[in-house]
Amino acid sequence: MALRRRNAPGTSLQVPGARPRAVIDDNGGILPLSRLLTPPVWWTLAGGGAHGAVQLGTLQAIRETDLEPEQLLGSSAGALTGALIAEDPVAAVNRLFYLWADLDLTDLVGGGWVGMVSPTSFTRSSLADNAGEMASLEEVYDARRFEDLVIPFGAVATDMISGQPTVFDSGDLLPALLASSAIPGVFPPVEIDGRYYIDALASANLPASLAMRRGAGSIVAFDTGSSPDKTIGTSLQQLVPAVNALLSTQQRISSLAQAAAEVPVLYLPTPADLPGSLSFNESFTTSRDSYLLARAFLLDLAEAYPTGSPALEPGLYCRPDAFSIDSENLSRVMRPVPVRVAAGGAS
């Protein structure tokens, strides 16, 4: 619903409406969906830079259900989110809210794009070092080792020699998070045990197929949305997101198709009109829009498969218009969940 602002008549407060009364009154208001998923349930979280704010919104919607992860697997920004969930599942959404309220590009690169571009920057392997990001990681996380986490978690990075995804799930936590989010050309590769790693977007940006191969019985996939098509320019702020999108799109489709052929995959909807993946100034709007889309999807899923329904069969449970790219493999496994509940509130 929209509330008119007294001090700004031309704008309104965009406050999500209440859920349907039947949902509020049943089961303490918690949407029962875990009955549909075969254990172990894995949550996979995609990368996407500033689009990681999408996952805050989808997690807010998930917290209105009884869905819980038994394993977590994240890439890049999704690894940072996944580690927060694994460290303290109950407080994770609140911590993410405050993180995204404060997070800015300078928390990662230090001086911003302008200061990074100089004649000497083109002789280095990256435009920025990773000291700023490491300092931020040290502030955000209390855990220093994977073994300190409450839920088993893996961070995905790309091995620079083989080009294949590598899952870090033991030992030092922060270097693995740094490697998973080392965007090529922006941040330097991260050395771990004598090998060099870069951002997972190059190999497994949405690691659903990895989760399936590692034993997932079902998967909840947290993607990060997309920006509208734009003319690609030559500035760094245009090139980096464009290259990232090219690297991740086909990989995402392939990963989801492979996983959904073997296990049920819930693919939570995301906005399609987001700002650039390096633009952090609209995180609140991004997370709110994502919350509304995911909430409506979960309500529709519960209606499509009411209490008493058997566990979901293998397939990709998503909105009919979830993907703009035609893929025969994807079409074969899609199990569309039609829109019944309006994203803005109760139907």
Image (cartoon, rainbow, N blue to C red):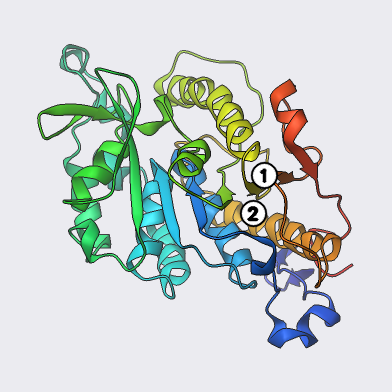
Residue in the image at 50% along x and 54% along y: 42
Specify which label sits upstream in the sequence, 1 or 2. 1
Quarter of the rendering containing residue 12: bottom right
Locate the C terminus and report the quarter of the image it occupies.
bottom right
The reply to whether the C-beta atoms of the residues labelled 1 and 2 are less than 8 Å apart is yes
Where is 7 relative to 210, above or below? below
In the structure shown, which secondary structural element does the residue marked by tag 2 occupy?
helix
Could you tell me which residue is drawn at 36 percent across and 42 percent down? 105
For the point 49% across and 48% down, the residue is 44
- Label 1: state its secondary structure: loop
Residue type at mark 1: give it: Pro
Picture quadrant where residue 204 is located: top left
Q: Mark 1 points at which residue?
A: 271
Mark 1–mark 2 distance (CA, rounded to whole Å): 6 Å
Q: Where is residue 149 in the image (x, y as percent from the top left)?
A: 28, 65
Work out which quarter of the rendered image holds the N terminus and state it. Answer: bottom right
The total number of labels drawn is: 2
Question: Which of the two residues, 71 or 52, is positioned nearer the viewer here?
Answer: 71
Which residue is the extreme one toward the left?
194
- Residue 60, image x and y in percent? 58, 66
Label 1 neighbour load within 10 Å: few <14, some 14-19, many 20+: many
Which mark, by number, is residue 290? Answer: 2
Please state if 68 lies on the left or on the right of 173 as rendered: right
Near-viewer residue (167 or 88): 167
Q: Is residue 114 left or right of residue 226?
A: left
215 relative to 32, above or below? above
Up the image or down, 57 lies above or below 130; here it is below
